[in-house]
Image (cartoon, coloured by chain):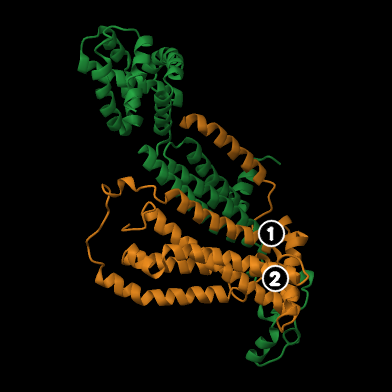
Amino acid sequence: MKKISLIPVLLVGALLVYAAQDFPEWGSPNSPASQSPVSSHFIANTGVDTEVPNMVTAVLADYRGFDTMFETVVVFIAGMAVLAILKNSSKKKAGSKEFEVDVEPDLIVTNTVRLLIPVIQIFAFYVLAHGHVSPGGGFQGGVVMGASFILIALSWDLDTALARFPADRCTLVAGLGIVLYAGIGLLSMFLGGEFLDYAELAQIFPVSREMARYHAMLGVEIGVGLTVTAIMFSLYANLSTEGRLKGGL
Amino acid sequence: MFEEGAIINELFIERLNYLIYVVLLLIGLHAMISKNNLMKKLIGMSIFQTAIILFYVSVGVKEGASIPIYLPEHDPHGSHVSLGAGNETEEASHGPVVLEAGLIKKYANPLPHVLMLTAIVVGVATLGLALALCQRIYQGYGTIEEDEILAKIEREEMRAHPSVAVKSMESSKTATSKVKKPATKSKESSTLSAKRAKSNPKTKAKTAPSTSQLKSSRSKSASSQPKTSASKSSSAMAKPATSKPKTKAKTTARPKSASTAKKTAPSKAKPRTPKK
């Protein structure tokens, strides 16, 4: 089996290496990707269109907002699917398979984490809120935030983390993030623009059309951040306990 | 044009990034195809994904370019910068401007970064989903080895439809008779169907010592030498498998002393059905 599978693999490899000869050189400014009018337009016009210095955020949340919205929905659906697959799946074996650990949480670990958690969470908010002017955004901030809850679960136990962020609230927060994202899109649609055409929000907020896009992007990123935070923690909580949400690692 | 030096030069020095991405991609692809363990398949999938991300990022690189965030002199809110710096340059004083073609080269391509940014997070979410599916499969079948799962599914089908199972057993018997001989010679014909076929004589070989009266079964057990070759892959499964054939042997082996393979097949399938 292994030898048979090598044949298509090596065939694909040969094709890819053959194709790689025609690829642009490393870092060449004349490569087709860099020469394409799309990316040139993004680099040239992001400042005028949205007043956002970070082009990546502008492309992510504004120019390709529709794409990002449904990627957030994909994250949400994945989290819900994990819930649906693992919920009540191990009820039968719950009596026989107990991973209950009686060991007290380690003093040094918990006290170090106690100091670290606020810093991590503030950093997550910083990454989220400064996604416009520095590297960052909703996805990154959400992952950092979710990691802080996972750190609580690792250093104490899952019950401690779930007391701070219950599983039901995970679902709620994840849904809320998407509602926030889609709500901003729908609001701009009701104001006469197209879906996710944030510039129309200037009609109800006392800002210019460009700054409306700037601030709407922040709202959108917050929605993304909420969803990603909740789903990351929910994934960990469900996977580490086979859906029982009790005990765990 | 096709001198050795030129191609090696092109591949290993100027386009090393593409070579690395191809190698990573092949490792992932090979793991996804050839590994039986679902977890290893997932690891392969992640390596594959990393290769794609590396490809996109290396496409987005521009020599001498900054990250795709406006430098202070092109910042849309440049006036703040000029206040902080103290000296008002021309570019910083006025608001956002459309960059000229020359300045576009100073920034890296933002598009690949955007695509990969979302791909990473979505990849994590889908990996979590895949892990959840693996856990569920393990709860259901007690294994995450692909061939063992397939063997168990086949056994379940036999239990559910004995009449269909007879036909499939007959066909598989003919398959075993074909497979056995080359298998004893060369231990390497371990395709999936062969493994499934081997698992049948294996169970018989275990029942044979408990009854210990059939010469035909001995000859079978003698012919089922592939057991040793198959034992490597299915040794993990052997523990759950042995407990079942023993109970089976007590019920089935008594009435049929020296029956042919065709007759044992339905009797093997039948006594299980009333149990369920």
In the structure shown, which secondary structural element does the residue marked by tag 2 occupy? helix
Say which residue label 2 marks: A187
Q: In this view, does A39 lie to the left or right of B37?
A: right
Quadrant of the rendered image containing residue A178: bottom right
Indicate the position of residue B59 as horizontal and vertical percent values.
65, 56
Kindly identify which numbered label has been placed on residue B18.
none
Quadrant of the rendered image containing residue A15: top right
Crowding at label 1, few (<14), some or many (≥20) Cα neighbours within 10 Å?
A: some
Residue B65 visible here: no
The chain coloured green is B
Compared to B240, does A158 lie above or below?
below
Instruction: Tell me what residue is drawn at x 50 percent, y 55 percent.
Output: A80
Label 2 is placed on what type of residue? Leu
Instruction: Tell me what residue is drawn at x 39 percent, y 25 percent.
Output: B159
The chain coloured orange is A
Say which residue label 1 marks: A28
Residue situated in front as seen by the camera: B13 or B143: B143
